[in-house]
Amino acid sequence: MKMDRLLSITMLLLDKKRIGAKELAEKFEVSPRTIYRDIDTLNLAGIPIRSTSGVGGGFEIMENYKMDKKVFSAADLSAILTSLTGFSNMMQGKELASALAKVKSFIPADRAKEIETKINQFDLDLRPWLGNRNIQRYIETTKTALQENRLLTFDYSDQHGNSTSRMIEPYQLVLKNSQWYLQGYCLNRNDFRLFKLNRMTNLQIKKEQFSPRQYQKPQLDFTNMLDTLQTNIKLRIHREVMDMVLDYCSFEHFIPDGNEHYLVDFPFIENDYYYNVLFSFGNKCECLEPSHVRTEMKRKIKEIAALYE
């Protein structure tokens, strides 16, 4: 988010005497051109930033400058505080607490009530309802390793249940669809890999440090690929599982079928994951078409029933 980056740049410049465009670009993972545009935006907002060229040059805030608390609107401050508070539920530590305290210091007394009202309109809680209780501890361990460029070791179970021991250079924590991932360079595979935190066990931070290498962010947007692979199947569902089905498609795909049921055009890919999604709806869901999906459902149901005979 641009506003978060602008605030962070301002804090860095207030904290440091001078910092270069390249260092800022690497820190925020944007281009130097974007940093120059950000600096122009901050100058237009009334923060006097000057640049110096040559060896040791960079950006700095003019001496004796104190930030005007009115530079951020009530909407700006409430958005930043809401985001930081949401992450502080999951990611603890001095950095977030300090950031929250600094942002709150920008709130003028005469606008405190207004901003508090806006913050209370949203509540971001990233903690899972149930599940692996090691995740929060693993996030903190990983965060330390990221900050100190230290190696991590862990045992990892893949989607087929095969377990391997790994040692990696950690590069990025990723939150995607309520799931946490770690992007790192695996020294066992000599390549970058994306690891799901809830598949890890015995996570340990090592004393050894590493020199960071160039890397690209993992690809996390598969919208175009999914649009190519997905087809719609016809389901008849009971209203009791409507909430579960709405996790996968929107209500515009629902057509009432009597008082208790709906007909649903459901996005589907023919793999085990999507068949298991259908099974998760239990006897409150029937696949009406296509016929080959119905046939495969029957076959899988017989396999499951055979386990209990």
Image (tube, rainbow, N blue to C red):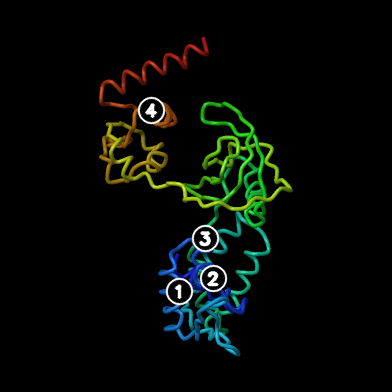
Q: Residue furthest front?
A: 55
Q: Amino acid at mark 2?
A: Ser
Tags 3 and 4 in contact by the CB under 8 Å rule? no
Q: CA distance from mark 4 to mark 2?
A: 43 Å
Q: CA distance from mark 4 to mark 1?
A: 44 Å
The circle drawn on residue 8 is 2
Q: Nearer the viewer, residue 210 or 76?
A: 210
Q: Say if 68 sits above or below 254 in the image.
A: below
Is the residue marked by circle 1 packed among few (<14), some (14-19), or many (20+) residues within 10 Å?
few
Q: Residue furthest bottom?
A: 64
Is the residue marked by circle 3 packed among few (<14), some (14-19), or many (20+) residues within 10 Å?
few
Q: Amino acid at mark 3?
A: Asp
Q: Answer with mark 4 or mark 2, whichever residue precedes in sequence.
A: 2
Reading the image, the residue beneath label 1 is 75
Residue located 52% across and 58% down the image: 124
The circle drawn on residue 271 is 4
Q: Answer with mark 3 or mark 4, whichever residue precedes in sequence.
A: 3
Reading the image, the residue beneath label 3 is 123
Q: Say if 41 sits above or below 270 in the image.
A: below
Number of the front mark, 3 or 2: 2
Q: Answer with mark 2 or mark 1, whichever residue precedes in sequence.
A: 2
Residue 301 lies, in percent from the top left, at 42, 18
Q: Secondary structure at mark 3?
A: loop
Q: Amino acid at mark 1?
A: Ala
Is the residue marked by circle 4 packed among few (<14), some (14-19), or many (20+) residues within 10 Å?
few
Q: Amino acid at mark 4?
A: Asn
Residue 221 lies, in percent from the top left, at 39, 47
Residue located 26% across and 35% down the image: 257
Residue 161 lies, in percent from the top left, at 56, 26
Task: Tell me how many marks there are.
Answer: 4
Q: Answer with mark 3 or mark 2, whichever residue precedes in sequence.
A: 2
Tags 4 and 1 in contact by the CB under 8 Å rule? no
